[in-house]
Image (tube, rainbow, N blue to C red):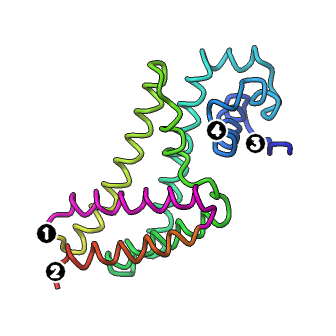
Amino acid sequence: MAERTPRGTARDRLVETTAAVIYRRGVTATGVDTITAAATVSKPTLYAHFRSKSELVTAALARQAETRRDGLTGYLAGIADRPPAERILAVFDWLRDWHRDAGARGCAFLNAAAELVESDDAAARQVIREHKRWWADTFAELAGEAGARDPARIGEQLLLVLDGANARVLVEGDAAAFDTGRQLAALVLAAGLPR
């Protein structure tokens, strides 16, 4: 099956194509020949923009993180009139819908983290850590707005629920794991928010 070719500069095409291909096929199973063919660029063009496949994968993960942040930020802005606890639970609905449309392989960041184990993967792993930290901080901020006694702890607990749901999507191929994640998130909030 042919990959969708993004528009824009060769660098943008490489980054976006890499993000799509490694999400579907995995980092180690995807060679630069596959990436250059899907992005419709030559290998010299790839290496003119990136010193290595590892650097390209890092850029692709950073782009995915930016896209995910922008998407969630926009979604939360659209439901800003709801109470913070409801917005937290709605995040699980948003993720369920995204996974049904485009994310049958779970979390791109967890998938990549499982494969990126070499020393030259340190920059990519840092992108993954920062993205997961952003999720925990986002949950903590919403929990703080809801009056949580320990918003940072709730943020960490909700990230664990989120990552568990992502793992179930990867294993089962069913985004309904986020419905269960929503139920668990409600329990976390019930335990950590004022009554």
Q: Distance between the residues labelled 2 and 3?
A: 47 Å
Q: Nearer the viewer, mark 4 or mark 3?
A: 4
User: Residue at label 2?
Assistant: 194
Image point 21% across, 76% down: which residue?
191
Q: Which amino acid does label 1 sit on?
A: Arg
Image point 44% across, 40% down: which residue?
128
Image position of 133 with respect to 72: above or below: above
Q: Which mark is residue 6?
A: 3
Label 2 residue SS: loop
- Work out which residue is located at the far front of the displayed protein and give it: 171
Q: Residue 149 carries which label?
A: 1
Which badge, 1 or 3, comes first in the chain's sequence? 3
Q: Which amino acid does label 3 sit on?
A: Pro
**How many labels sit on residues?**
4
Considering the whole magenta stretch, tell me its main secondary structure: helix
Q: Distance between the residues labelled 1 and 4?
A: 40 Å
Q: How far apart are marks 2 and 1 (CA)?
A: 8 Å
Label 1 residue SS: loop
| Picture coordinates of residue 57, whole percent (x, y) | 58, 30
